[in-house]
């Protein structure tokens, strides 16, 4: 799907993933700053913690994994086995 988007003449379509990642990155950074340095009422602490957990545990790592790559456990194990079979693990 991204390959088809890159062949489009519309700049917004070609750069959508980058804009989307910037949006989430800026939102996450602003939220981290706000809940760290601005006062939060005690009755809102649970919501703050849930949203913060989502951003730290899901949104930010997904963006990083998309742009910098992620090796799944199965693929990593397969590469180790292939290296061991080739004599790379002596």
Image (spheres, grey):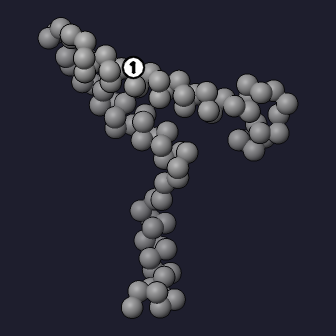
Residue lying at 36% horizontally and 20% vertically, measured from the top left = 31
Residue 87: x %, y % from top left: 47, 91
* Rendered location of residue 6, percent (x, y): 77, 39
Which residue ends up furthest to the right in the rendered image? 9
Going by the picture, which residue comes out furthest to the left?
A: 42
In the picture, measured across the screen, residue 40 lies left or right of residue 67, that is left
User: Total label count?
Assistant: 1
In the rendered image, which quarter is residue 48 located in?
A: top left
Above or below residue 31? Residue 8 is below
Lateral position of residue 72 relative to residue 51, left or right: right
Q: Residues within 10 Å of mark 1 (few under 14, many from 20)?
A: few
Q: Position of residue 54 (x, y in %)?
A: 34, 30
The residue drawn where x is 39% and y is 37% is 58
Q: In the picture, residue 67 is in which quadrant?
A: top right
Quadrant assignment for the C terminus: bottom left
Q: With 15 as the anchor, is 25 left or right in this view? A: left
Q: Which residue is mark 1?
A: 30
Residue 71 pos. (x, y %)? 48, 59
Is label 1 in a helix, a strand or a loop? Answer: helix
- 69 left or right of 29? right
In this rendering, the answer to whether 53 lies above or below 81 is above
| Residue located at (48% from left, 73% from top) | 78
Q: Is residue 26 above or below residue 62?
A: above
Of the 4 image quadrants, the one containing the N terminus is top right
Task: Looking at the picture, tell me which residue is in the foreground, 26 or 42.
Answer: 26
């Amino acid at each position: 799907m991204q390959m088809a988007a890159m062949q489009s003449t519309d700049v917004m379509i070609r750069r959508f993933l980058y804009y989307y990642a910037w949006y989430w990155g800026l939102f996450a950074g602003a939220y981290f700053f706000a809940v760290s340095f601005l006062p939060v009422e005690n009755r809102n602490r649970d919501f703050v913690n849930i949203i913060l957990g989502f951003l730290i545990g899901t949104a930010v790592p997904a963006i990083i994994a998309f742009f910098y790559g992620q090796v799944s456990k199965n693929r990593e194990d397969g590469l180790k086995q292939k290296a061991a079979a080739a004599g790379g693990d002596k």
